[in-house]
Image: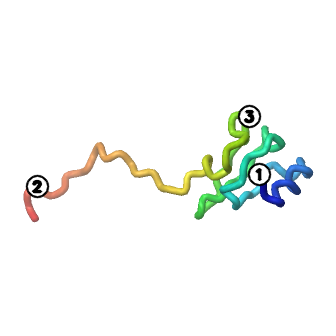
């Protein structure tokens, strides 16, 4: 556990949309039904903490990678010309 999380859980009113930079920290039961903003390296991702997320890490719920779009339509392109 990180020390700042222990300080945060005592002040429950400040937990609404609280910013968290530490993705490695475990989610405590005191955070249930609160919204937190988890830093993914670029922006903050808003996340609601539910009972199923207790014990996991904050970083699991804020993806740090961009999703590649499915390439169903590639476009006209160049046919045979290089």
Which tag is nearer the camera, tag 2 or tag 1?
1
Dot 2: element: loop
Q: Nearer the viewer, residue 49 or 77?
A: 49
Q: CA distance from mark 2 to mark 1?
A: 52 Å
Q: Tally the numbered discs.
A: 3
Residue linked to disc 1: 17
Residue at position x 56%, y 52% in the image: 63
Q: Nearer the viewer, residue 25 or 75?
A: 25
* Residue 52 screen position, x and y as percent: 69, 34
Q: Is residue 14 left or right of residue 40?
A: right
* Residue 53 screen position, x and y as percent: 69, 39
Q: Mark 3, residues whose alpha carbon is within 10 Å: few (<14), some, or many (≥20)? A: few
Q: Nearer the viewer, residue 23 or 40?
A: 23
Q: Is residue 68 left or right of residue 19?
A: left
Q: Which mark is residue 44?
A: none
* Outermost residue toward the top in this view: 52
* Residue 8 screen position, x and y as percent: 85, 54
Q: CA distance from mark 2 to mark 3?
A: 54 Å
* Residue 12 screen position, x and y as percent: 89, 47
Counting residues from the start of the chain, the first of labels 2 and 1 encountered is 1
Q: Which mark is residue 79?
A: 2
Residue linked to disc 3: 51
Q: CA distance from mark 3 to mark 1?
A: 17 Å
How did the renderer colour the structure?
A: rainbow
Dot 1: element: loop
Residue at position x 91%, y 52% in the image: 11
């Amino acid at each position: 556990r990180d020390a700042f999380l222990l300080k945060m859980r005592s002040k429950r009113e400040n937990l609404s949309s609280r910013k968290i930079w530490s993705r490695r920290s475990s989610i405590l039961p005191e955070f249930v039904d609160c919204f937190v903003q988890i830093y993914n390296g670029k922006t903050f991702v808003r996340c609601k903490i539910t009972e199923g997320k207790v014990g996991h890490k904050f970083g699991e719920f804020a993806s740090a990678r961009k999703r590649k779009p499915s390439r169903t339509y590639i476009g006209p392109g160049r046919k045979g010309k290089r």
